[in-house]
Image (spheres, coloured by chain):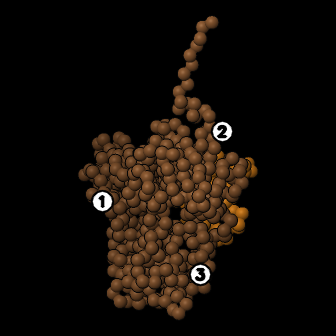
Chain colours: A orange, B brown
């Protein structure tokens, strides 16, 4: 949908695979997704990556972008 | 000179003359429909009418706001410019009170009439009230809208003790909110287990223990007979049918939803608990569609009517409804929904229709790992996964492809289950 909930806004060219890391504070400007908003493929990647580690997704096709926060069993940031 | 007769199909003429679409409801179903309609028909008139006072927000994140873990801003999905940018008229604080299918009009509470060529009803539900004495007292909350979440957050932050009623997927959100806000609580349940229609007592005990660790005590074979209030009509105590008393200055109730079907009363639109639709999200009226948790849709996988309130399902239904409003029959709704709980250290996910079926199989692997699959006519129709979500894709594939797993249910719950483990035709799917 819009850039607030939808597909990725432009992000800097980063070639390293995305990872997730736990976060405790969420700034007001953060883009936040609940686990249930993600595709089955991304859910699987997140469930096997959490709480910290490499996230096996393609950020050009996933609705997740670097900097996004996901509400799962922890809050994690994609980076 | 030779004359050429040109016949224009009236339906084609109507479409090229720009259609008028009206959507009632600005939840995820209505909003995704509007977005799809705009993509499909750039010149159409599109209006969204909602009785809420704010545009689309993320309903599955409002519990995190009430817990005090998320600020307000990320909960909002659309601001009003989203609608302006797409030339969609948004009417906030507008309650639709009447539908005239023959006249192709709907009427709002203030008497305003809206004409439509095609109408989408994405009108959702309203929390069910507990029919007991003093259930409308101050301090008793239901949990459905963002405004409910704001009210709950404001109250729970100053509360001393709490009671939660409703042993289902919404009730546990309230229990988790009290836990996150470090307010001691009792969670009153009518049976002997949380979500007893989908979980066995063994599976539910994993949830119970997680609640206890967070200072929320499940109380079984309980419920509420009545509430006691002080002189200011504020709740002080919940009294259960056994006569046991639980002091609480915060009470949360989530015993289900009443779907907003009252405006259908004067029409011949078919409905029961929700609005009947086919797999294209169309009602028994050619120009009226429905989407979201209000629908009792024809579930192609289940082979029966079904209702589902999950976010992904509602979003997909909105999209499918819009496509079929533009071109009926163009795409059917075929979807395995899922719903997760993220309140604990371990993940929880239900999918499909875990409360249905004529058979089931379950297995426990550790104190925080458990699975149950619901089976109907030899096929998986739903399930619950606690602790390990990795089999989700495999089970959903079997369900989506309606694979007959008769006689092999124990194989399904092997901890490292693989699709290749199934014998015969099932394994070849």
Query: Which residue is denoted by mark 2 in the rendering?
Result: B43
Chain letter of mark 2 equals B
Above or below, comparing residue B162 to residue B96 in the picture: below
The image quadrant of residue B166 is bottom left
**In x, y percent, where is residue B425?**
30, 41
Chain letter of mark 3 equals B
**In x, y percent, where is residue B417?**
37, 54
For marks 3 and 1, give the CA distance: 41 Å
Chain letter of mark 1 equals B
Q: Quadrant of the N terminus of chain B?
A: top right
Query: Which residue is denoted by mark 1 in the rendering?
Result: B360
Dot 3 or dot 2: first in sequence order is: 2
Do the residues at pointers 3 and 2 share their chain? yes
Query: Which residue is denoted by mark 3 in the rendering?
Result: B155
Dot 3 or dot 1: first in sequence order is: 3
Contact (Cβ within 8 Å) of mark 1 with mark 2: no
Q: Residue at x 44, y 80 (%)?
A: B187
Q: Quadrant of the C terminus of chain B?
A: top left
């Amino acid at each position: 949908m819009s850039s607030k909930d939808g597909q990725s806004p432009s992000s800097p060219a980063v070639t390293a695979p995305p990872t997730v890391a736990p976060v405790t504070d969420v700034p007001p400007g953060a883009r936040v997704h609940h686990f249930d908003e993600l595709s089955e493929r991304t859910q699987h990647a997140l469930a096997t990556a959490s709480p910290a580690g490499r996230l096996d997704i393609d950020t050009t096709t996933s609705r997740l972008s670097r900097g996004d926060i996901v509400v799962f069993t922890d809050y994690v940031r994609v980076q | 000179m030779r004359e050429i007769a040109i016949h224009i199909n009236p339906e084609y003429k109507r479409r090229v003359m720009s259609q008028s679409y009206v959507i009632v409801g600005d939840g995820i179903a209505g909003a995704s429909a509007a977005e799809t309609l705009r993509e499909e028909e750039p010149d159409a008139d599109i209006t969204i009418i909602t009785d809420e006072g704010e545009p689309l927000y993320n309903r599955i994140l409002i519990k995190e706001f009430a817990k005090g873990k998320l600020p307000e801003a990320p909960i909002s999905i659309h601001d009003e410019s989203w609608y302006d940018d797409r030339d969609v008229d948004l009417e906030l604080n507008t309650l639709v009170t009447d539908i005239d299918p023959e006249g192709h009009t709907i009427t709002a509470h203030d008497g305003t009439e809206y004409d439509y060529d095609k109408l989408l009803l994405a009108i959702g539900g309203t929390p069910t009230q507990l029919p007991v004495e003093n259930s409308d007292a101050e301090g008793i909350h239901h949990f459905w809208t963002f405004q409910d979440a704001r009210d709950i957050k404001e109250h729970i932050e100053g509360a001393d003790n709490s009671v939660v009623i409703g042993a289902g997927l919404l009730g546990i959100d309230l229990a988790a909110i009290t836990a996150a806000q470090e307010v001691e609580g009792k969670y009153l349940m009518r049976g002997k287990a949380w979500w007893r229609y989908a979980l066995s007592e063994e599976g539910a005990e994993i949830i119970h223990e997680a609640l206890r660790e967070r200072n929320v005590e499940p109380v079984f074979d309980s419920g509420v007979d009545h509430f006691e209030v002080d002189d200011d009509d504020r709740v002080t105590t919940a009294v259960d049918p056994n006569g046991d008393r639980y002091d609480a200055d915060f009470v949360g109730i989530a015993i289900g939803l009443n779907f907003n079907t009252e405006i259908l009363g004067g029409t011949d639109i078919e409905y029961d608990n929700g609005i009947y639709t086919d797999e294209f999200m169309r009602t028994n009226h050619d120009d009226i569609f429905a989407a979201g948790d209000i629908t009792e849709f024809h579930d192609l996988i289940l082979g029966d009517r079904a209702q589902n309130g999950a976010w992904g399902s509602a979003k997909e239904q909105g999209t499918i409804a819009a496509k079929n409003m533009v071109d009926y029959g163009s795409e059917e709704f075929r979807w395995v929904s899922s719903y997760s709980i993220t309140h604990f250290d371990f993940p929880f996910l239900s999918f499909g229709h875990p409360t249905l079926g004529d058979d089931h199989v379950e297995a426990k692997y550790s104190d925080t790992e458990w699975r149950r699959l619901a089976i109907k006519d030899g096929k998986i129709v739903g399930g619950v996964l606690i602790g390990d979500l990795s089999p989700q894709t495999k089970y959903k594939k079997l369900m989506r492809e309606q694979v007959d797993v008769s006689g092999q249910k124990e194989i399904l719950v092997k901890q490292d289950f693989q699709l290749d483990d199934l014998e015969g035709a099932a394994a070849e799917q």
